[in-house]
Amino acid sequence: MPHSPVLAPGSIVVFDNRGTGASTGTPPAGVDGLVEGALPFTRSLGLYAIDLLGWVMGGVAAQGRAPAQPFLIRRLVRAGSSPGGPARAGDEGSGRP
């Protein structure tokens, strides 16, 4: 599998979606917007296979991204995140939003 023309093999890329962290722009309205913002970024780097770590809300977005590009994601790790979706009755104190 060819390597990215921009990155050395094994490089670690930290990504802030638009309007979050150190990036500019308007933040996406929801998780679908986070997923849609990450796809062009990955393509712009010329990546063919990635190991993806999503932290907190990024974990929920990473989970949404996996079905959108199953050929791209070799490994998916969600850290410090919930399964997403609306809270259920009785979830108080569970750490789930």
Image (cartoon, rainbow, N blue to C red):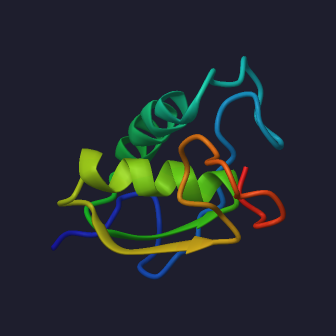
User: Which residue occupies 63% across, 21% down?
Assistant: 29
In depth, the one of 97 and 25 nearer the eye is 97
Count of marks overlaid on the render? 0
Q: Is residue 11 above or below residue 20?
A: below
Describe residue 55's horizontal placement relative to residue 83 as left or right: right
Quadrant showing the N terminus: bottom left
Q: Quadrant of residue 14?
A: bottom right
Residue 88, given in percent of the width and then of the height, sits at 61, 48
Residue 96, given in percent of the width and then of the height, sits at 71, 58
In depth, the one of 32 and 86 nearer the eye is 86
Describe residue 86's horizontal placement relative to residue 70 as left or right: right
Pick out the residue farthest to the bottom: 10
Describe residue 21's horizontal placement relative to residue 11 as left or right: right
In depth, the one of 22 and 93 nearer the eye is 93
Q: Is residue 97 above or below residue 86?
A: below
Residue 92, given in percent of the width and then of the height, sits at 80, 57
Q: Is residue 26 above or below residue 69?
A: above
Describe residue 93's horizontal placement relative to residue 33 as left or right: right
User: Which residue occupies 52% across, 48% down?
Assistant: 61
User: Which residue occupies 21% across, 58% down?
Assistant: 70
In depth, the one of 93 and 14 nearer the eye is 93
Q: Is residue 84 above or below residue 32?
A: below
